Image (cartoon, rainbow, N blue to C red):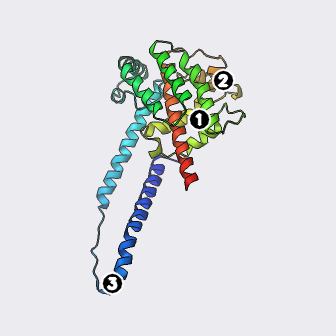
Amino acid sequence: MKLDEKRSDEMQKSLEHISDSLNEMMRPLIAALSQLNLNWEKIEFPKIEFPKIKLANSQNDILKEVDLEDKLCKRFEDAGWIAHYTSPWRIAEDASLEPDLLDRKTQDYYMNEWPEISEVFIDSVNKSDVDCEAKKTFAEAVAAHTHGLYRCAPRLLFPEIERVSRSEIHDGEQKPITSQKDLQSLIAELTHAEMAPFGVAAFRFYVKLVNHVYLQTDKMNNADDINAVFNDPVPNRHVALHGLSSYSTVQNSLNAIIFTDYIFQSISKIKQNQREIAEY
C-alpha cells in the first residue's frame, strides 16, 4: 500500500473513532430530550459547515512533510545509514551534499553528540516492553560502541533479537526463525501512528528489514544482488553470524544499534496490540 493511501486509511479510522465517540456522548442527551415529547419538526437546528478548503490545505501540508521526510530518509540510505529519530536531519536537508560527504558528516555528528545520543538509545529501549536481559544486552552493545569496539554490536544484537522474538512472538518454540518471517509480517501490520516517534523512517526501515537485513545470501543466485548485500553498511544477519563479514566500522555498529531499537519498539507495540485484542 502506498504511503498516502495508508495515511488516508488512518485518517478515515480516526474520523470513524471520533464519530463513534460523539454518538456515545449524545445518547444520554437524546434519551433526556425524548422524554420532553417535543415537536421535532418545528425545531430548527443550526447548519454546521466544515472548513473543507482549510482541511484540504492541511492535508496537503501533511503530505508535503511526508514527502520531504521520505526524501531525507532516502538520502541517508544512499549514504549507508538507516534513518532514525537520532539522525542529523538538518544536515541531510543540504541537497548539495554527495552521499560520501553526508556519510562523513553523519559520522561526525554521532561521534560529537554520542554522550547524549547514547543516553537517548538506552532510555528508549529501557522504556520498551522487552525483558531485562534484552535491555542489558542492548546497553552492553552501546557501551562497546562508546569504547570503539565496533565489531560487537552486530554480532551481539542479532542473537538477542532472535531470543526476544522467540520468547515474545513464538512463545519459546524451538523452531527455526532465522529469517524472522513472522516478525516481519507483524511489523508490516503496524500503522504510521503506532510506529511513532519513528514516522516515515519506520516504513523505510521495514523495507530495509525485508529487503536486506534478513536476506539469506546462500539462497540468492544473482551475483550483483549478493555483492550489494555484502557492500551495504547496514549489517545483514546471515552475513554477520556466519562470519562472512567483520562489520567492523562505526557505521556498521550504529546501524545495528539503530535497527535493534526499531525492532524492540516494534515488538513492544505488537505485544500491546495483542493484549488489547485479548482483553476485548
Please give the residue where the numbered disc 3 appears in the rendered image: 36
Q: Nearer the viewer, residue 83 or 14?
A: 14
Q: Nearer the viewer, residue 106 or 113?
A: 113
Disc 1 to disc 2: CB gap under 8 Å: no
Whole-angstrom CA distance, mark 3 to mark 1, is 62 Å
Q: Position of residue 106 (x, y in %)?
A: 39, 21
Q: Position of residue 206 (x, y in %)?
A: 53, 37
Please give the residue where the numbered disc 2 appears in the rendered image: 223
Q: Residue furthest top?
A: 148
- Image mark count: 3
Mark 2: secondary structure: helix
As shown in the figure, which amino acid type bears the numbered disc 3?
Leu
Q: In the picture, residue 244 is in which quadrant?
A: top right
Please give the residue where the numbered disc 1 appears in the rendered image: 210
Q: In the picture, residue 47 is in which quadrant?
A: bottom left
As shown in the figure, which amino acid type bears the numbered disc 2?
Ala
Where does the C terminus fall, quadrant-wise? bottom right
> Which residue lies at the image location 52% right of the left edge and 39% below the top edge?
268
Mark 3: secondary structure: loop
Q: In the picture, residue 120 is in which quadrant?
A: top left
Q: Nearer the viewer, residue 128 or 153?
A: 128
Image depth: mark 3 or mark 2 in front: 3
Q: Position of residue 224 (x, y in %)?
A: 62, 24
Up-down: is 28 above or below 112? below
Mark 1: secondary structure: helix
Disc 3 to disc 2: CB gap under 8 Å: no
> Which residue lies at the image location 65% right of the left edge and 32% below the top edge?
179
Up-down: is 87 above or below 246? below
> Which residue lies at the image location 47% right of the left edge and 51% below the top edge?
5
